[in-house]
Image (tube, grey):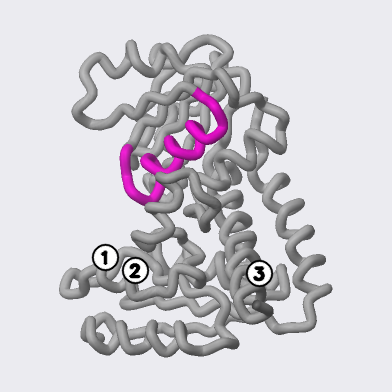
Amino acid sequence: MILDGKKTADMITMRIAKEVADIEDKITLSIFLVGQDPASIVYVNKKLKACDDAGILVDSHFLNDNITQKELIKLVEDCNKNPDIHGILVQMPLPSHIDADVILNTIDPNKDVDGLTIINQGKLLAGEETIVPATPKGVISILKKNYIDIPGKNVVVVGRSRLVGKPLALLFLQNNATVTIAHSKTTNLKEVTKRADILAVAVGIPNFITADMVKKDAVVIDIGINKIEGKLIGDVKYAEVSEVASYITPVPKGIGPMTIASLLENVLICYQIQKKLLDK
């Protein structure tokens, strides 16, 4: 059965749009795009459209790739200080002369819609309420909204990135799953993945997971997005794995739309956090 991320994301976006419409304040997200990376431009345009659909205003900063780190820090700090800016997103990757960690940790944690500041990542590790990276959040949302149980399940996350793999594993743990993280150095990967009741894959290698690596009736979440000969394909060999899995997310229209919808949720959460602080 196909887990339709587009359909689920549309429902989330509609709900957020209603909540935003009921708020007197204008909710605003600042987006920073440095340079002309083609994939980043596509992602940012999708985020701009989603914000528009939800009634969230966008303060766009499209910057040349020769901007200095110091100049970018100053722009982010200005947004931190601006009470009319409720969320800040710096699109990755940044040019090589800019230290991404420095920029990310310049963002006020209460405006960190990507959940990538060391403060928000630390809170996630500690199990505290925090802003969670949008892609892992989208994975958990699509499972729950399609009534797929997580507690007690054997979950294998293939990939250990700070943006997806690690936070996703923590979210599964918080939802009482038994979690294994596999990666490029894992020996006998096939034996590991075949134990999974839920298999989540984020390695950035097209068609990496094949049917013989998947347990019968497993739930397969394909987080990869790879462009091959003009077509978007995932990290999972969809046609053959869909014959084995009980549920599977397609690429496109799977986790991609869920990531965008979760980002909108995070913008609203950031607004609510700041509103509470102002009301104290």
Residue pointed to by mark 2: 104
SS state under label 2: helix
Residue of label 1: 101
Left or right of residue 244: residue 65: left
Foreground: disc 3 or disc 1: 3
- Could you tell me if the residues under marks 3 and 1 are in contact, i.e. CB atoms within 8 Å? no
Is disc 3 surrounded by few (<14), some (14 to 19) or many (20+) residues within 10 Å? some
Q: Which residue is mark 3?
A: 272
Which of the two residues, 70 or 68, is positioned nearer the viewer here?
Answer: 70
Q: Specify the amino acid type for callout 3.
A: Gln
Q: Mark 1, residues whose alpha carbon is within 10 Å: few (<14), some, or many (≥20)?
A: few
Q: Secondary structure at mark 3?
A: helix
Farthest-out residue, left: 97
Q: Which residue extends farthest front?
A: 280
- Residue at image position (54%, 19%) is 153
Q: Residue at x 54, y 50 (%)?
A: 256
The magenta region covers: 160-177
Q: Earlier in the sequence, mark 2 or mark 3?
A: 2
